[in-house]
Amino acid sequence: MYLRGMVLAGLGRHWIGRIRLALALLGLPCTVCTPGIRPAISCSPSQCFATSTCHLYTTSVGTMPSAVCPHIKSRCPVYPGSKIKRFSVPDDKVSWGQSWPQYSPVSYTDPSITKKPAWADLDVGAFSPKFNALDGKVDRTSFEGNYTVEKGKPLNPRGRTGVTGRGLLGRWGPNHAADPIVTRWKVDAKGKKISHPASKKPVLQFVSIKRKDCGEWAIPGGMVDPGELVSLTLQREFSEEALNSLAASPAERAKIHERITKLFKSPGFQVYKGYVDDPRNTDNAWMETVAVNFHDDEGSSVSELPLQAGDDAGQVRWVDVDSSLSLYASHSHFLEMVAKERHAHW
Ligand SMILES: *[C@@H]1O[C@H](CO)[C@@H](O)[C@H](O)[C@H]1NC(C)=O
């Protein structure tokens, strides 16, 4: 999953965000996530920059957002889950096109990666990866096109990050994730759509999970397994997160599983596909994702999932889609695109 703290139904978390921002501005270490878990979406980019002047925009080609400004979270001063300080990269030196002989990035690969878990690559030199290609079952192609490989190591297509090696990421080059955004209409007791008083537009709700590792609310995404179709990753991650949290009987589980399978068989609306500015990115390893919206328009499939259930350690909820949600920048943008697509309140 990705990261983010958000404002949940009136539980004002703005002040927490401000404190985090203040800490980030003071350069204090701002990480609370536990390293050592398999990286999916990292926990809290907001730990690095609660706000950013970097906006995603919609290109003339259609709905594909692109970052218009260089690495923000990928230059987060302290690398997540560590005390490693990134080499400071000014805006005008992010691009590899800018020659910068003084650039002296820190090399860092987290112990969770160097202990060689099955899902991670070996060190460059210890194996022969096929970059920019489907390497056996591992997809090493980038949505951004071919990336440069220098001295055996892939170069981040969006430029410098102040750290070399893989940090918390298992793969050299692109690390592919998938973000399922499951939505329904917010309805009253009689099943009538509820419109927002200000926009007069119907309100969407999306499935959000509270991450066990760091307590942040998130879209329930995860890493694409080797050889796995993205469509399957989307369903698997959603099912694991949503179902595991439910105190349901085997019969209820089977019914829920069937409904989820049906919803994920629908085409879905592809919200984004590409590079993600993630605090775990390095000069040699980075996150890419495919975000897809699956919408239960009739309210007949997953809308009835009793998502309030679950223990404290991993909750799943329906959360109103609204521009005041303080999510990780790109996630907030994903939801905005979903709201626009569905003619819903934002
Ligand atoms: C990208 O790299 C692959 C692998 O090196 C190569 O086969 C392919 O021709 C390259 N494509 C382009 C457009 O350069």
Image (cartoon, rainbow, N blue to C red):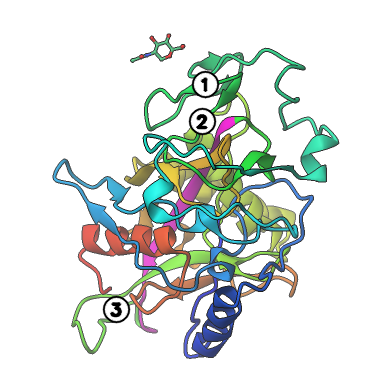
In the image, the residue with mark 2 has its CB under 8 Å from the nearest atom of ligand 1: no
Q: Residue at x 30, y 48 (%)?
A: 66
Can you give x and y, in whole percent of width and height, for residue 195 in the image? Answer: 25, 81
For mark 2, give the secondary structure. loop
Q: Is residue 296 left or right of residue 123?
A: left
Residue with the mark numbered 3: 192
Can you give x and y, in whole percent of width and height, for residue 224 in the image? Answer: 58, 36
In the picture as drawn, the residue positioned furthest to the front comes out as 102
For mark 3, give the secondary structure. loop
Residue with the mark numbered 1: 149
Q: Along the line of sight, which residue is nearer the eye, 309 or 208?
A: 208
Q: Main secondary structure of the magenta part?
A: strand
Can you give x and y, in whole percent of width and height, for residue 295 in the image? Answer: 36, 56
* Residue type (three-letter) at the residue carrying disc 3: Lys
Q: Is residue 312 above or below residue 235?
A: below
Real-space Cα distance between discs 2 and 1? 6 Å
The residue range painted magenta reads 173-189
Sequence order check: which comes first, mark 2 or mark 1?
1
* Residue type (three-letter) at the residue carrying disc 1: Val
Q: Can residue 299 be seen by looking at this rendering?
A: no
Real-space Cα distance between discs 3 and 1? 55 Å
Residue with the mark numbered 2: 155
State if disc 1 and disc 2 touch (CB < 8 Å).
yes
Q: Along the line of sight, which residue is nearer the eye, 48 or 92?
A: 92
Q: Can residue 146 be seen by looking at this rendering?
A: yes
